[in-house]
Image (cartoon, rainbow, N blue to C red):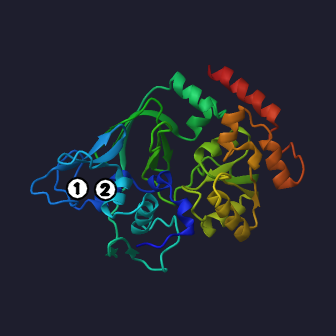
């Protein structure tokens, strides 16, 4: 059995699905799976004729055994059932088999030791989630309400290539979306964001795709490395350039950092403060980056009970003390010429909304 690992807190379903898809996972662990909605023989039991299928239900993929109704699993619980392990161990198996690097390697080997003597050194053939096409829809009042809670305007969403969608296609398979679902275009790839669904993300991006990079100015005083495109857009509304990697668990490449240093006078980290997690993985990674590059690390105080900038804005409907927090962390004093004040920014945001209405 796989040894327990201290880094298991890094293994979240959302993080895994930001790198690979449910389709990829089923394709790897279901040897007889060919395509969606087409029956095949189960490898979990003796199956003389095709009796199971991978189906799409409420925006996510499910393994459905028509002979055993209780054998209906999402991709993570399928792996859990197949290898008779717990949920975290299932995520660990996926992490290692796809070499995602979300947790430390086992014994520094390239193979995965699993359960019941499972040993494999085969490489997964990942059918990357090529979003062949998406169907955009008009912006709605629900969209406005959702993004306004983060003080993000439609103009900013368009600048960062965020669009509302009603459908999308993965490898020719059509998926319907909930009332508020968005496509983030990053380079020539997409991330699908469904904030109200159990699994919020589908993606065909790689670690090479840096969110917000295209929208950066040529040069500047300050750049912030943050945790999500949503926070990138929040910082943009505050007048601060920012980027986000595909996951907080990824160490930025030296080549990228050196290039950014040539363009910006200062670089700071603004990662999640997972205050309710004893291991606080967001700040654990922020500390590693800080120690390697000597960047300032901006941390939202625990007293606010907010993990990130967008959480803070949604809770208080204001940038509140975030501008001051950033200034004090970076400059050691209030430096109003570099970062918009809360009052100025709030006034600007209000004016933008009036213009867009």
Residue neighbourhood size for the residue with mark 2, other residues' Cα within 10 Å, grouped as few (<14), some (14–19), many (≥20): many
Residue neighbourhood size for the residue with mark 1, other residues' Cα within 10 Å, grouped as few (<14), some (14–19), many (≥20): many
From this viewpoint, which residue is outermost toward the left?
A: 48
Residue at screen point 64% across, 45% down? 231
Q: Quadrant of residue 165?
A: top left
Percent x, y of residue 124? 34, 66
Percent x, y of residue 43? 21, 61
Residue at screen point 9% across, 57% down? 48
Give the quarter of the figure containing the N terminus. Answer: bottom left
Describe the element under mark 1 as helix, strand or loop. Answer: loop
In the displayed structure, does residue 70 sit left or right of residue 288?
left
Q: Quadrant of residue 90?
A: bottom left
Q: Mark 1 and mark 2 in contact (Cβ < 8 Å)?
A: yes
Spatial CA span between label 2 and label 1:
7 Å
Q: Quadrant of residue 239?
A: top right
Q: Nearer the viewer, residue 282 or 73?
A: 73
Q: Which residue is mark 2?
A: 26
Q: Is residue 301 visible?
A: yes
Give the quarter of the figure containing the C terminus. Answer: top right
Q: Which residue is mark 1?
A: 33
Q: Nearer the viewer, residue 283 or 171?
A: 283
In the displayed structure, does residue 108 sit left or right of residue 258?
left
Percent x, y of residue 301? 77, 49
Q: Nearer the viewer, residue 103 or 278?
A: 278
Percent x, y of residue 131? 37, 46
Who comes first in sequence, dot 2 or dot 1? 2
In the displayed structure, does residue 83 sit left or right of residue 273?
left
């Amino acid at each position: 059995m796989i040894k327990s690992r201290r880094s298991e807190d890094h293994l979240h379903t959302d993080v895994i699905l930001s790198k690979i898809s449910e389709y990829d996972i089923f394709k790897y662990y279901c040897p007889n799976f060919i395509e969606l909605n087409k029956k095949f023989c189960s490898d979990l039991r003796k199956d003389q004729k095709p009796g199971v299928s991978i189906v799409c239900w409420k925006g996510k993929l499910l393994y459905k055994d028509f002979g055993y109704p209780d054998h209906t699993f999402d991709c993570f619980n399928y792996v859990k059932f197949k290898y008779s392990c717990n949920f975290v161990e299932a995520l660990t198996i996926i992490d290692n088999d796809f070499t995602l690097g979300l947790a430390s390697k086992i014994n520094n080997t390239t193979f995965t030791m699993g359960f019941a003597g499972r040993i494999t050194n085969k490489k997964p053939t990942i059918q990357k989630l090529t979003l062949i096409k998406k169907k955009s829809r008009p912006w709605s009042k629900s969209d406005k309400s959702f993004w306004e809670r983060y003080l993000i305007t439609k103009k900013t969403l368009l600048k960062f290539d965020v669009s509302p969608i009603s459908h999308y296609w993965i490898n020719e398979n059509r998926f319907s979306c909930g009332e508020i679902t968005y496509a983030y275009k990053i380079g020539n790839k997409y991330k699908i964001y469904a904030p109200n669904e159990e699994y919020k993300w589908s993606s065909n991006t790689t670690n090479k795709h840096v969110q917000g990079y295209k929208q950066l100015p040529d040069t500047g005083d300050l750049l912030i490395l943050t945790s999500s495109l949503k926070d990138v857009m929040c910082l943009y509304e505050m007048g601060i350039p920012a980027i986000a990697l595909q996951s907080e668990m990824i160490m930025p490449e030296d080549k990228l950092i050196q290039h950014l240093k040539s363009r910006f006078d200062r670089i700071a980290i603004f990662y999640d403060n997972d205050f309710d997690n004893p291991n606080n993985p967001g700040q654990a990674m922020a500390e590693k980056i800080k120690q390697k590059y000597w960047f300032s690390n901006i941390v939202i105080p625990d007293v606010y009970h907010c993990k990130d900038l967008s959480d803070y804005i949604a809770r208080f409907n204001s940038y509140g003390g975030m501008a001051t927090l950033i200034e004090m962390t970076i400059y050691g004093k209030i430096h109003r010429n570099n970062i918009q004040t809360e009052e100025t920014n709030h006034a600007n945001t209000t004016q933008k909304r009036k213009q867009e209405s």
